[in-house]
Amino acid sequence: MKKLILYVVFSMLLISVYAQERTVSGKVVSLDDDSPMPGVNILIKGTRSGTVTDLDGAYSLVVPGDSATLVYSLVGYISEEIAVGNKSEINVELAYGLQELMELVIVGYGSQQRKDISSAIASIDTDQMQDVPVYSFDAAMQGLSSGLNISSPSGTPGAAINVNIRGATSISASSQPLYIIDGIPVVTGNNSALNSNIQPTNPLADMNPADIESISVLKDASAVAIYGSRGANGVILINTKRGSDGKTKVNVNYYSGISEINNTPELMNSRQWVEFLNVAAANDGLGENYWSDIIGDPESLPTYNAYDEVFRMGTTHNADVSVSGGSEKTNFYLSGNYFNQEGIQVGQDFNRFSGRFNIDHRLNSKLTVGATMYLGIGKHNRTINENDEYGVVINAQAWDPTTPLYDETGTYINPFSGWGWWALENPLLIAKEYINKSNSNRIQAQAYAEWEIIEGLSFKSSFSIDKNTLTEESFTPAGFNESDEGQGIFATYDESNVIHENTLNWKHMAGKHDLNALAGFTWQQNDKIFSDIRGQGYASNDKYKIRNAATITSAESNGSSYGLISYLLRFNYGYDNRYLVSLTGRADGSSRFGEEKRFGIFPSASVAWNAHNESFLKDIAWLSQLKIRGSYGIVGNQEIGDETWTGKWNLSASYDDQGGIQPESLANPVLTWEQTTQTDIGLDLGILQNKIGLTADYFIKNTESLLLSTNISGNSGFKTLTSNAGTIENKGFEIALNTINVNTDKFDWTSSINYTHIQNKVVDVVNDGEILSRNFILKEGEPLSSLYLIKFLGVDPATGDAQFQDYNSNGLINFDDRQIAGGGMPTYFGGFNNVFSYDGFSLQVLFYFSGGNKIFNQSRYAYENYGTLKSGIPYGNYNTRSLNYWKQPGDITDIPRPSHVDPDNSQNGQWQRFSTQYMEDGDFVRLKTVKLSYNFKSEVLEKLKLNSLTVYGVGQNLLTWTNYLGFDPEINTNTSSESDLNVLQGEDFGTLGQARTFTLGINIGF
Amino acid sequence: MKLFQNIYKTSAALLAIFALGACQDLLDQESQIYLENTNPITNARSAQSAVIGMYDGLQSDDLYGGSFFIANELTAGNAEAGAFQVVWNELSTGIVPTSNFHVEDMWPAFYKVVNTANTIIQEVPNLLDLGESDKADILGQAYAIRGMVFFDLLRQFGEYDLENSIYGIPLPLEPILSPTKLARKTVKQSYDAILEDLGKAEDLLSYSSKRSIITLGTVEALLARVYLYRGNYDKAFEYADKVIGHNDLYNLLGDYNDIYRQKGNEESIFEIAFSLQDQNYTSVLLLTSPAEVLASPELLARFGRTDSRSALFGEIKGTMRCLKYGSNQDAGDANSIVIRLAEMYTIRAEAYAHDGDLDAAIDDLNILRARAGANLLIKDAFNSKDKVMDAILKEKQLEFAFENGNYWFDLGRMGKLTEIRGLPEFRRIYPVPNRELLADNLLVQNPKY
């Protein structure tokens, strides 16, 4: 190893010493008719420096030395790469055609040319993600691929992103895709042990987005079957950057920016609030000016807006440095990243340091070895928000506007000393003084060897590690409302995957026959160890380490593990570039499956017909591509928990200081993977030399044997048994249209639009009609995350009373009157991306849209009601919308007459119920990203002795068009588990909306 | 290069061997923290641990960790919901939906304790390393707890006040290892099973001054309670009087407040022990800000001016709280008292009243009132059985408020639900959770729900 490093360093030195700058010139002509081609971009590979051909197709360019490679590209033509060598004149012919067709697409355990692919795989253009100021690559993929639904449930930096490929396929298990980075399946679940009412951490935020070279989204069964029991939710394959031969390139990138909250629902000022309360009191017979007499004259009361205190201008800084290069034998890529995002809400921030070293070395013509090493450190500071009465946002909204948040001395004011019943705690205090720190470490390492046994037959073996650890601390300060003594948590989580993979790959071409076969054996061991120590009784709120707690109230260490053994096979056959067949199968054995169901086999097949290569279509000039694809296969989801199937007694049943045992769960020895059968029919169409490219797919995904907490009779001591007992269906279509709209010497304009429609349906579940977390129901014939609410019938114009449907006709309005009110999952989504380039300037404009879903705006339920609780003081501040209340007979409005009467005690109460009153449409269109960049031209670069220089500005979430009344239609409250993301989507309670961000950046290549 | 290829081949072979070797363990991962449920009790140690496990089950948040008796205090009107959680707001109205979260959770929580008891009852007689007296002690506790839990289930979900009703409860007597459907037994069958279990426990257990576990004294006190509910006043009297007679074990404390300040005091017959490491959920319900459960104004208005029992209610952060479980929301180490000597006086009083001995009944009540510093009841004013029964009901409300939910059952038992709480009679028992009916088609819902 030491030798290897020396060798690398030495070769780097050699390269820089011997690099000699000189000029290369030549001419670019069209392959079709030899006509000169103006406007062709010529780039020195791996840099951003280059030039453009003139009207005669001629060019001249200074290259760093013989080892440079030039890339000739023009929209609509297939790019050429030519090594400079000792040549001083290079003439090039470019062929018409969609670059995409020749593009190498990473697929499971290998890569394939786009034209040879018979399954549904999307490649994400990572250029479009570059320099977008988001903390994690998964967020940056939003809107860039069809079938890929991505939402950021909150504006919390470093928080988890919800990603579904072709719909949610599960109820209790995860519906998040499998992520494979450089062949390593990575830990993506939230392992945080802190308060579950915080946005979960995103383990993918440990990764540096700038390291990513390419991303493939595997969507249909044929593409994912090679991942067998983990493929049901689709797979996202990521390769990181590796070095290439040539001069060592150094790239420095820096951007910095500011952000602010996108939108805030407007709250009443003190005058509006007290006057509104007066009306409520008067309606209840308490007389005129009831509240003015208590709180004060509304005209003279000051207003304190808690938003102003808890929201702030956030900042983002990102710095990337990468060094890459290589010689004939050894290539390397080194990178470092620092990212720091201070959230738009006080108390939230995330930062990351990372380093990567990828190396490949050819020992001889037959044998290549290499390694990948990545280390990332993430630091999360989060605050309570989601679904918690002690959330920052909800307490800011409820804050009594007549009371300041702190006095002249800076002391926090307790909400109970004001006039609001809820807020429960000073939101600024929660944001600043409640501590929730999570430090994550991510190690990814791989060593591989690849041996070309004979030509066409190669063997690859790799050992990989993915290790994710979290160290967390939280503190609830003493002497405020949530804790009398102060409470602390110290927790750790350590999850590691060790993977060994062996694959044998055979490629053979014989005449018109093109064969490619893959066989493999892999195993994986996953181990989790975690601990959690809780203490209370702190002498000071300043030092929150758990050692300072007077009493340790609980301390535990815990762990679980699973093993996976797999055999895989794939056989691809192409005949004459016309007919393609792919057969894939994987056998997975997992300790997670019940002892009677240990091994599963996951087969798939796909076929494709490149009709445009048929003689009878070859003459149609406008038709450049017509590929018809079809696939069918069965894949699984093994995210069912390590020990779910076992029947257990726990040993944590202690009593009166003695250890005890008691039942923990019933066994289900036939528990097994969830099984998804997917049928896909697809079409790839290229028109007018592929200036218009269309990809369309129709799919039906049927997931059976759903892992469900089957309702069982409680006489067993348990409410549920985890069983395979249900079916859900996702069917839909997706369309991606890529067009080259304008393509001239100076000005290019390309567009891509993608649209996906998904219909999710619960087909069959044992617990048909089970109510989930109060506002949702699992019901056959309805989608997952169906909202289940009392139906609001509007306000009676005669009386001003809120009217609700007495669904069970028993004369009472209560929870038994709930009914299905709408689906919480978007049914359509997509992106619309435009790239304009003109003379070194480039402008990218990305819109994202999503909709068809309903949101239960529970925040409104909380701050748009009119009650007092038992203590006789108002509930909290209200939205200004409430001012549009019913005032006199005949008024048509959706806001009932104000009243303090509690509907739980009186059917005449007008305030909050879990009703459709607070259910809204979730449709929105968002101007997601606008990026303007300028590449300095070679004349300038030469003077500056740089390879490339780009300056850019990016705006994110600039505009949102929606009717949703909360902070943000994209947010989702129930994210604490991956199961919640399936069945509890579409609720918003105190979740922080997304930020609008502006950044400026510079990228320098040496 | 040849050397290298050899190295490579060797290492490839080694890898393959390693890979195959690892496979054996990969698919059989041993649990790091759990026992298998097929055979959890194998020796004396595990049998004793399972006994502890039963008490842990009773500690559950859903049961004596608070929710069980607090729910009954809410439906009875002694308590009222003070914050947001729908579960408590629903209970506070006294109109309990069939999908109420607490009701849904309480049912399996009780049956989990039954299953632990059933496993003990099945396995312990076969153990070889347990002496007869240890076996008797273990089995006695298992029978007693099973009987007590069946009784709690019966009075919560069954028509416990109608001997001939078909609406008893399911009575599993063997461990359940896979989902099982069970029909309700009749009320008579339920009472018979409860009395059989308590009877066996009575034979097996002995007296002890321990109060955090079930002893013979506990069983006698529970028998007094069960017979009272069943309307067998002679037996109720017999057992209540017997427990009152155990001066060596149980005595009323001089200061009412001490009942809650001193764990395991002389008045306590059986209490569920909690500690800072094993906290009582009751404090979460009563002491957080805002507290989910507050003392109702109706309850507070019932205390006489001099009644020191009202001192256990006070204001915290603007709302009236019950302070029997302390006043520090972080310190949930107060015990939950399941049964204490004062209840024996009220049971004896009720038996006297049924027997026509009204003065003796008032005497028993006055013992408790005198201790509390409340005005003594004047016998002349309680010259009818109805008046005495009203006095007993009120005394139990004041004496045991927020303690064990007795007031709710007394309201139902004495037919006072409509008069005092304004609720129809059928609501004296809770509905069987709807989810139980969905999972078990042999079960039937209670009348009128």
Image (cartoon, grey):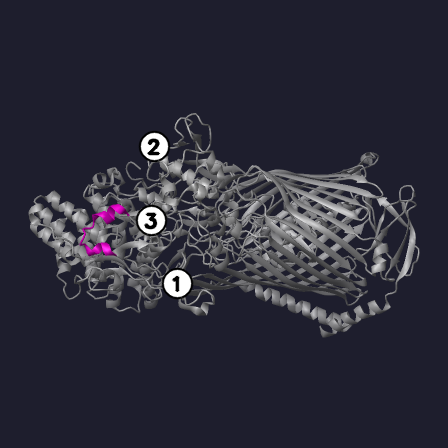
Q: How many marks?
A: 3
Q: Label 3, on which residue?
A: B107
From the viewer's perspective, is residue B369 above or below residue A831? below
Q: Amino acid at mark 1?
A: Glu
Q: Label 1, on which residue?
A: A485
A109 or A276, nearer to the observer? A276
Tell me which segment is drawn in magenta.
B296-311
Mark 3 belongs to which subunit?
A: B
**Labels 2 and 1 in the same subunit:** yes
Quadrant of the snapshot with the N terminus of chain A: bottom right
Q: Amino acid at mark 3?
A: Trp
From the viewer's perspective, is residue A139 above or below residue B260? above
Q: Which mark is residue A810?
A: 2
Percent x, y for residue B30?
48, 63
A141 or A804, nearer to the observer? A804
| Marks 1 and 3, how far apart at CA | 34 Å
Q: Amino acid at mark 2?
A: Asn
- Crowding at dot 3, Cα within 10 Å, few <14 / some 14-19 / many 20+, comes out as many
